[in-house]
Image (tube, rainbow, N blue to C red):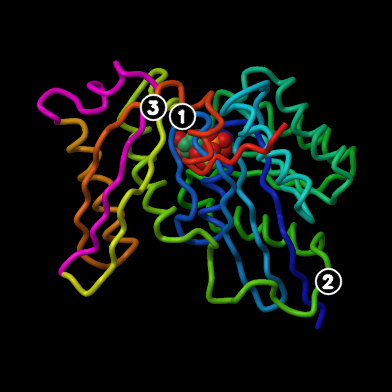
């Protein structure tokens, strides 16, 4: 049997739909999705098993320009995923305002010298209907396999994921067998998944610059025989005056975030959940390597 297995890095601009695509490929929600750019901060693994292959998909932050702080961490994380993958998927969103930004993603994939597949994404957006063909012609001239589609159109999702898997399989290295236990669909632990669900609900309920300076830390996670899993989390903001905004008038907003997050966590854990959320300020944590490390955004020493 010609079994294949390997790591497939998803690269693209912020908001290009990498995490959405990953979740569809895996058939489970492993990576959070919001309408805001720079949602994914740390790599997230989603595993797909077929009889003839195991694809270990690695979702990465969107590629951003950066020199310091959290943005530099995001860029380094994306670059590291490129270096460590066997194969890449370049997710090219057709609605990108500056076409040069897509060129950068194509260049990164090409310069990696790894086999790669291009996914022309968000083809449902009618305002950009002329773009897919131009991109496809260009990529095909470069000899790159291309798949195009939408992750939002329910009736297209199955075809898109099948095309992506079929396109990836021949690019993967030969292997004796699966690299990860076939029962696993992610390597994230429940604590991480819960922190990310809370962060997703915060991103969706908050606007302007607040999400970019917001992080979530689980401070208590008790899964004993009690009636409910007990979770306490801190929502960390970077500025003192963001704290009342997250809490909202009469604590309405934090209650809404808590209700939405709890519902999703109950789905994930399949048990009752007691969720306690608090808001704390860590001034400019996104510029402070020690705070960043504490939140799991590990910064390599210079
Ligand atoms: N119109 C359209 N929107 C999409 C499609 N796929 C994803 N989206 C939306 O695009 C937004 C960003 O999706 P994500 O999956 O979070 O994008 P991402 O590339 O992971 O973003 P970052 O993690 O911030 O880099 C969300 O609002 C998605 O619902 C698509 O095919 N068409
Ligand atoms: Mg993402």
N-term-proximal mark, 3 vs 2: 2
Disc ID at residue 282: 3
Residue 249 picture quarter:
top left
Does mark 1's beta carbon lie closer than 8 Å to ligand 1? yes
Q: Name the residue located 54 percent from the left edge and 58 percent from the top edge.
A: 158
Image quadrant in which the C terminus is located:
top right
- Ligand 2's image quarter is top right
Q: Which residues are magenta?
A: 227-251
**Disc 1 on helix, strand or loop?**
loop
N-term-proximal mark, 1 vs 2: 1
Q: Please name the residue that numbered disc 2 is placed on.
A: 174
Image quadrant in which the N terminus is located:
bottom right
The relative height of residue 137 versus residue 165 in the rendered view (above or below) is: above
Q: Please name the residue that numbered disc 1 is placed on.
A: 36
Q: Is residue 58 left or right of residue 189?
A: right
Q: Name the residue located 71 percent from the left edge and 55 percent from the top edge.
A: 8
Residue 297: x and y in percent read 55, 40
The reply to whether residue 183 is visible in this rendering is yes
**Disc 3 on helix, strand or loop?**
loop
Q: How far apart are the alpha carbons under marks 1 and 3?
A: 22 Å
- In the orientation shown, which residue stands out farthest toward the left? 250
The reply to whether residue 124 is visible in this rendering is no
Q: How far apart are the alpha carbons under marks 3 and 2?
A: 47 Å
Q: How far apart are the alpha carbons under marks 1 and 2?
A: 38 Å
**Disc 2 on helix, strand or loop?**
loop
Residue 225: x and y in percent read 22, 74
Give the camera-side residue of 154 and 54: 54
């Amino acid at each position: 049997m010609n079994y294949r297995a390997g790591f497939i890095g998803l690269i693209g601009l912020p908001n290009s739909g990498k995490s959405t695509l990953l979740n569809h490929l895996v058939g489970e929600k492993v990576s959070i999705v919001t309408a805001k750019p720079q949602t994914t901060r740390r790599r997230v693994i989603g595993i797909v098993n077929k009889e003839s292959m195991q694809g270990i998909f690695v979702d990465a932050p969107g590629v951003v320009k950066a020199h310091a702080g959290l943005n530099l961490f995001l860029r380094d994380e994306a670059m590291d995923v490129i270096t460590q993958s066997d194969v890449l998927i370049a997710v090219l969103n057709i609605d990108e305002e500056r076409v040069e930004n897509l060129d950068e993603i194509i260049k990164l994939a090409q310069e990696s010298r790894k086999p790669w597949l291009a996914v022309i994404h968000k083809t449902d957006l009618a305002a950009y209907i002329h773009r897919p063909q131009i991109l496809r012609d260009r990529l095909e001239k470069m000899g790159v396999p291309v798949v195009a589609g939408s992750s939002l159109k329910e009736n297209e999702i199955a075809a898109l994921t099948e095309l992506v898997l079929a396109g990836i399989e021949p690019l993967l290295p030969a292997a004796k067998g699966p690299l990860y236990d076939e029962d696993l669909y992610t390597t994230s632990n429940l604590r991480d998944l819960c922190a990310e669900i809370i962060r997703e609900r915060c991103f969706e309920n908050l606007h302007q610059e607040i999400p970019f300076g917001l992080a979530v830390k689980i401070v208590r996670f008790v899964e004993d025989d009690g009636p409910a899993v007990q979770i306490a989390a801190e929502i960390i903001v970077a500025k003192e005056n963001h704290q009342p905004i997250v809490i909202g008038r009469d604590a309405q907003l934090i209650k809404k975030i808590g209700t939405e997050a709890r519902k999703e966590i109950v789905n994930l854990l399949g048990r009752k959940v007691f969720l306690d959320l608090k808001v704390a300020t860590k001034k400019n944590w996104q510029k402070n390597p020690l705070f960043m490390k504490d939140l799991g955004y590990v910064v390599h020493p210079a």
